Image (tube, grey):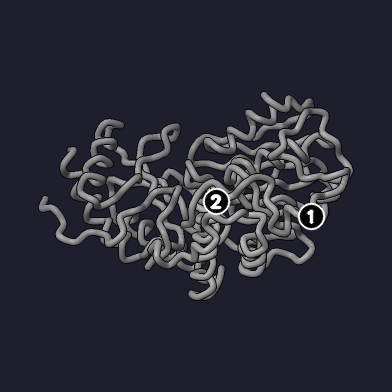
Amino acid sequence: MHKPSAKPQNPCFSSGPCAKRPGWSLAALDASMAGRSHRAAPAKAQLKAVIDQHKALLGIPEDWRLGIVPASDTGAVEMSLWGLLGPRGVDVLAWESFSADWLKDITGQLKLPDVRTFEADYGALPDLSQVDSDRDVVFVWNGTTSGVRVPDGDWIAADRKGLSICDATSAVFAYAMPWDRLDVVTWSWQKVLGSEGGHGMLALSPRAVERLQTHTPPWPLPKIFRLLKKGAVDEAVFAGATINTPSMLAVADCLDALAWVERIGGARATIARAQENAQVIWDWVEATPWAAHLAADPATRSVTTVCLTLPGLSADQVKAMVKLLDAEDAAHDIAAYRAAPPGLRIWCGATVEAADLRALLPWLEWARAQVC
């Protein structure tokens, strides 16, 4: 098979950090706050703008708190688990690497006495109907390492007594989030926004805030996990005063990404772009006998982390394919997650261009021909 002549203009298909927005450049960033204290009024205003623009673009309810927290989505999730869990039993859904990590934290680190676990192998979901709305529930919306997502929020009771704690790092800006069914939502800048990593977003419903104020965890909380000040919610965290020092260059990059989202039509447009991108790969898989979806059920297939298996190829052959594509600058960072079954993981979030995905497909065919 001849080597394809055309390549993706942007061969970055990593699932995090993800591709920058179309047309991105360092020159586009307002770096005026680089070298300034994040406590300075204009720097704090930029941090507040990140919060306000997220709330507006995502339609987060007015009575929710939203803050910038340390350590990306991981920090936001850990802050939630350590600060909120304990008063009720908890149901944990685990079907890929990160949800399995939250399960390990809850059972192995927090050692909560009343935990029910619902697990599934890569490519599948646990039975969501088993979740008890009188208990807290911890889950990921979009399994970044498996390409499997929850189909919707209908399985979460509207009149629930427990909190629903959702790791939504590969989902926010790619799906319409049902805020009325959620209480804690976490994400990071480096996924669908394609911005810089290291900073997390933590959104809390009024019910979650009430839990925060009325529940005292029996374990010590590190400084970066503390959201209370003198027994009350530290409102400054939700107004741009971060717990630790943020990167003001990363803040500038996030503001640039948010401005791009607004220019193209808001979250509705980013959701549509992700769907269109995923459809390019889905249609190709449908017509390609040697590729298959890791997520067998179409209703649970991710539109951001599209994970494929390559039946008939060994793990070494898949690895060789990935190396060839990387060396040719046709596709960077598309190997399946290290703990997942061998295959490909192609990011299809909003910052990726559908034309680049279409240009990638002949290269996948070529790379397979080279290793077979």
Please provide percent x and percent y for residue 286. Answer: 34, 55
Residue 233 in sight here: yes
Asked which quadrant contains residue 370, the reply is top left
Q: Nearer the viewer, residue 344 or 263?
A: 263
Q: Which residue is mark 1?
A: 235
**Residue for point 41% across, 52% down:** 347
Q: Nearer the viewer, residue 52 or 204?
A: 52
**Residue for point 79% across, 55% down:** 235
Q: Earlier in the sequence, mark 2 or mark 1?
A: 1
- Label at residue 173: none
Asked which quadrant contains residue 367, the reply is top left
Q: CA distance from mark 2 to mark 1?
A: 21 Å
Amino acid at the residue labelled 1: Glu
Report whether 225 appears left or right of 124: right
Against 48, residue 144 (above or below) is above
Q: Secondary structure at mark 2?
A: loop
Report whether 150 appears left or right of 181: left
**Residue for point 47% across, 54% down:** 304
**Residue for point 56% across, 68% down:** 267
Amino acid at the residue labelled 2: Ser
Name, please, the residue furthest toward the left: 2
Q: Which residue is mark 2?
A: 247
Report whether 309 appears left or right of 242: left
